[in-house]
Image (cartoon, grey):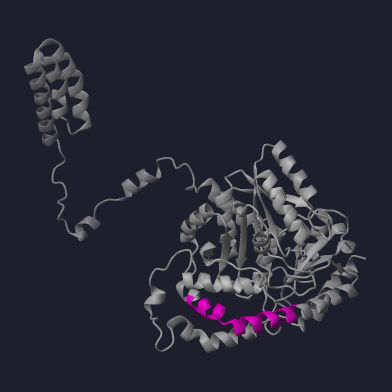
Amino acid sequence: MTQSHRTTEPEHRKPTTATAMRLIVPLQGVVQGRGGLILGSLIPCALFYFLQFYLKRHRSPNPPSPSTSSSNLAGLPRTSSRSALSSRGSLGPVRISARGSSIAKPDDSPYYIGFNKFRDDPYDKINNPNGIIQLGLAENTLCLDLIEKWVSENLSDSIMGRDGDDLSISGITTYQPFDGMMELKVAMAGFMSQVLGQAVSFDPSQIVLTAGATPAVEILCFCLADHGNALLVPSPYYPGFDRDIRFRTGVELIPVHCRSTDNFAFSITALDQAFNQARKRGVKVRGILICNPANPVGNIIPRETLYELLDFAREKNIHVISDEIYGGSIFGNEEFVSMAEILEAEEVDKDRVHIIYGLSKDLSLPGFRTGVIYSYNESVLAAAKKLTRFCSISAPTQKLLISMLSDTKFIQEYLETNKRRIKKLYDSFVAGLKQLGIRCSESSAGLYCWADMSGLIPSYSEKGELELWDKLLNIAKINVTPGAACHCIEPGWFRCCFTSLTHEDIPLVIERIQKVAETCK
């Protein structure tokens, strides 16, 4: 019992200063070993109180009172303490995380370099006629007159409600579900059926809404693949994928190179070769990412190829992400088939198929930041709903879109007018390029054309292509996207987005390109 008491007693007498600890602990061990319980307790206590008395006697006189006024405090010397802090040997500037540093690096892709140059010197017919003309951004302004008319007539009622409706300011100021209001999901499902084919019926419960298609594809990649895993992507592909997917998920993209002899259509053979090569390198492929219609080429994946793609995904046990954001911007004669239509027609494993959609292209509303994840996988939907906490759509935007997408008459008029205007401008732009000896690949959809300028590059190489791109950007003042930024294996191809132009702009664009073309002969 005595020994037990000795070992526990010191725990009830904890010194309050580091000096006391250094004095008490060694002596306590010695005394306990020789003199027993009483001396082992009294001597440490005596030393502790002696130390307190000593410190009290030698404390600095007249310490400042806590109640000293601010004027007196201001007179206290501070220079010495600040100099002491600054002389402690700094290790350099404060650092940020490795991932933050990686993202903060200057853009090295021509895709983003062109954007930055355009922002500094944008073309304006009146205010800056010698500025850079933007052909690098897939933005559609051809039907903004229809959008403007509808919004001017319906804005207030859409957001605040009409007389008698059960809507109020609370409907747009309070928290809403991060993955989107159910009313908008219902309206979006109807719109997607109208755009992507009447044969397709979309289930609102399988929709997750995001602030644009960019977070939609990032969330899907986050859910389907781990850091260091990879997706197969037929190339050339949209250059923004490199940033959108890799930045935060750490998922790699493996280009599956396609050739101009096949109008840049991918084959299952090419996918299989890329899959096997990745496996030999120890890279785990978790899925295939396709754009249908294709960006930047503008072609459409045939129905039979979609069937073959699903068979390949099942054989390799991987996912399929189908980006169908240009599904309503079709102006050619090719048949567009949504992956949803294939799944409804056949008994296939739906859990591995996921569709991306949005309103930036087909409805010309990139500023509304509205994207869609459509998945048949309950686990993906559950995870995606939680991740939309970081990219939800504002309530006023959702209210406005519920009304707009539910106006089937307006939507039908818009879609038909939009296709006619895209087709007309496409024909005019491609004809202008043809006059310069520049041909374009066969295209049926999208807001761009895929132009072959290989005859203008000084050498048939990526270096030669980038030299031409630099001339177009800095001499002709035309921002286009070089094929190298799209991982195109054949030098000399450029994506030219034309739907932000007017018919009056086309002669000026062709004239500027011609000036550069003449220097390349």
Count of all numbered marks drawn on residues in the image: 0
434 vs 383: above or below: below
229 vs 39: above or below: below
- Looking at the image, which is closer to me, 108 or 452? 452
361 vs 157: above or below: above
Q: In which quarter of the image is residue 298?
A: bottom right
Q: Is 208 positioned to the left or the right of 322 in the image?
A: left
Residue extending furthest toward the right = 521
Residue 303 seen in render = yes
Q: Position of residue 178 (x, y in %)?
A: 45, 64
Q: Does the magenta stretch include residue 412?
A: yes
Residue extending furthest toward the top = 34
For the C terminus, give its image quadrant. Answer: bottom right
Residue depicted at x 9% and y 29%: 49
Residue 254 seen in render = no
Residue depicted at x 46% and y 76%: 396
Q: Where is residue 252 in the image (x, y as percent from the top left)?
A: 65, 48
- Looking at the image, which is closer to me, 408 or 391? 408
Q: Is 58 positioned to the left or the right of 364 in the image?
A: left
Q: Where is residue 268 in the image (x, y as percent from the top left)?
A: 77, 50
Judged by its main secondary structure, the magenta piece is: helix
Q: In which quarter of the image is residue 371?
A: bottom right
**Residue stretch rendered in magenta on the structure:** 399-422
- Looking at the image, which is closer to me, 110 or 495? 495
Q: Is 442 positioned to the left or the right of 381 in the image?
A: right
For the N terminus, give its image quadrant. Answer: top left
Residue depicted at x 70% and y 81%: 416
Residue depicted at x 75% and y 61%: 303
Q: Does the magenta stretch include residue 96?
A: no
507 vs 260: above or below: below
Q: In which quarter of the image is residue 367?
A: bottom right
Q: Position of residue 272 (x, y in %)?
A: 76, 45
